[in-house]
Amino acid sequence: MGLLVKNGKIVNADMSFFGDVLSDQGKIVQIGETLTAAPGDEVIDAEGQLLMPGGIDPHTHMELPFMGTVASDDFYTGTRAALAGGTTTIIDFVIPNPQQDLLEAYELWQQKAEKSVADYSFHVAVTWWDESVREAMGVLANEHGVNSFKHFMAYKNAIMADDEVLVNSFKRARELGAICTVHAENGELVFTLQQEMIEQGITGPEGHPLSRPPEVEGEAANRAIEIAHLMNVPIYLVHTSCQQAVDAIARARANGQRVYGEVLPGHLLLDDSVYRNEDWSFAAAHVMSPPFRPKGHQEHLWHGLQSGTLQTTATDHCCFCDPQKRNGIDDFTKIPNGTGGVEDRMQVMWHHGVNSGRLTENEFVAVTSTNTAKIFNIYPRKGVIREGSDADFVIWNPNTTRTISKNTHHQKVDFNIFEGMDVQGLNTVTVSRGEVVYRDGQIFAEGGRGQYVKRPLHSADSQALKLHSAQRKVTPVKRENNY
């Protein structure tokens, strides 16, 4: 049975137009005017509403073991919440323990994701290095559709990748035609500043931003970008949160380097005053890394998104409930890092982006879906309403309102960083591979219907590599030996 959506305004990243969309067997088969349904097809009248590509969240952590506990949203509850908010695809992270085989970790995450109700893909983190890691990266890339590898420059004595790991992994990614993603924070500086805070008697959540100031992120962003430049590999900075990191990306892009930046709605809207709230639970609920920044950085991030310096929005969805956060009741360094948002991203970005005039409707589609699909090489399968593409889209009512609350959200967490926020502009229907999986507050998707999305490697540009090598090639100076 097919699905015909009629009379809507189709909004892609490059253009908007009125038309009907017919999908069948998971694909968009026809776009046009006054299309006719076949017997048995479901018909939805979208008059007065928009049809936009389903959201793609390039940064989630479902069921992540971290800091002595496990994220409260698993692949079932987390992807249900995603569909409720208009996101039809997530890219999660396989994070091996140090010395753990990357392929073993990948299989473990695939088992976790079997209950997903939305489509999903994986970045794989490189947390250590030897020849087996190099070989595993090749298998993941060539056989399992992994075209991006994650590097944590933070979390010393855990999953932090030092410069040796970065250099080796970046070089291998270049050989494969993969992209490197980076959590840019100087782990050594963070560790030192954390100890200083504790020694000064600062043990509450307010110590978290003090131990991770913007300079810590700026330094790491610059270092990662320079290493990527020398290794001639594209780089993607996750959860860019401060002016220093945005400026580093802008400088590199101005010089022709392939550098991409991601930003979270929370970093666009919240500031570090949340950590000084008298309610410990409220302050701890906001502990994530990088932390929310002092006022002023938010507008700089908006400018980065508007100018194209930052290309994508994500959530870094990694939920921990209050009892879990209380692992750090006497020591902020033990508060599990993470907040939610996979359900709220699209609506928050529409309200504060489009309704405010900061973004056009087409730019909204670009930063919530299309740019991610292009950067991670699943476009035009995902990220666009086009004949032949997956039938992933939302029917969006720009006039409908919602008050965000932990009491009504579908995320499996007892706090929402956007609590009480009124947003205007919501998905009334979410369609995933041609199936209506959400409509007017009800989720219809069953566990296990989500499909793993392989992402092809980027074609290696051998001429560019040769040119890069030629530019750096040094001819030895011939000298006579005078004895």
Image (spheres, rainbow, N blue to C red):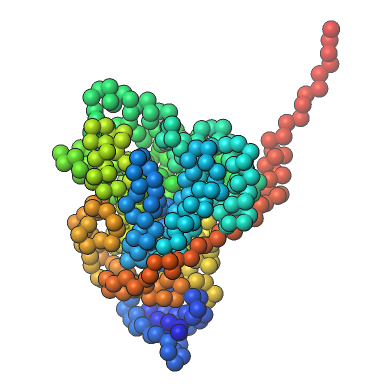
Image vertical order of residue 61 relative to residue 422, above or below = above
Drawn side of residue 326 relative to residue 45, left or right: left
Give residue 139's position: percent from left, percent from top.
Answer: 62, 51
Give the image quarter of residue 8: bottom left
As drawn, 129 above or below 53: above
Depth order, front residue of 377/32? 377
Name which residue lies at 24% across and 28% down: 202
Q: Report the front residue among 94 and 105.
A: 105
Which residue is at the front of the view, 459 or 318? Answer: 318
What residue appears at the point 62 percent right and 56 percent down from the top-left corner?
A: 143
Give x and y (percent) for residue 369.
44, 62
State which quarter of the image contains the C terminus. top right
> Residue at the location (46% across, 50% down)?
93
Viewed as shown, does residue 27 lie left or right of 4? right
Q: Residue at x 47, y 53 (%)?
A: 109
Question: How many numbered badges does the structure rendering display?
Answer: 0
Specify the farthest residue to the left: 278
Tell me the quarter of the image containing the N terminus: bottom left
Residue 17 lies in what quarter of the image? bottom left
Q: Position of residue 443 (x, y in %)?
A: 32, 70
The residue lying furthest to the bottom in this view is 39
Frontmost residue, 115 versus 254: 115
Q: Position of residue 165 (x, y in %)?
A: 55, 35
Residue 405 drawn above or below residue 261: below
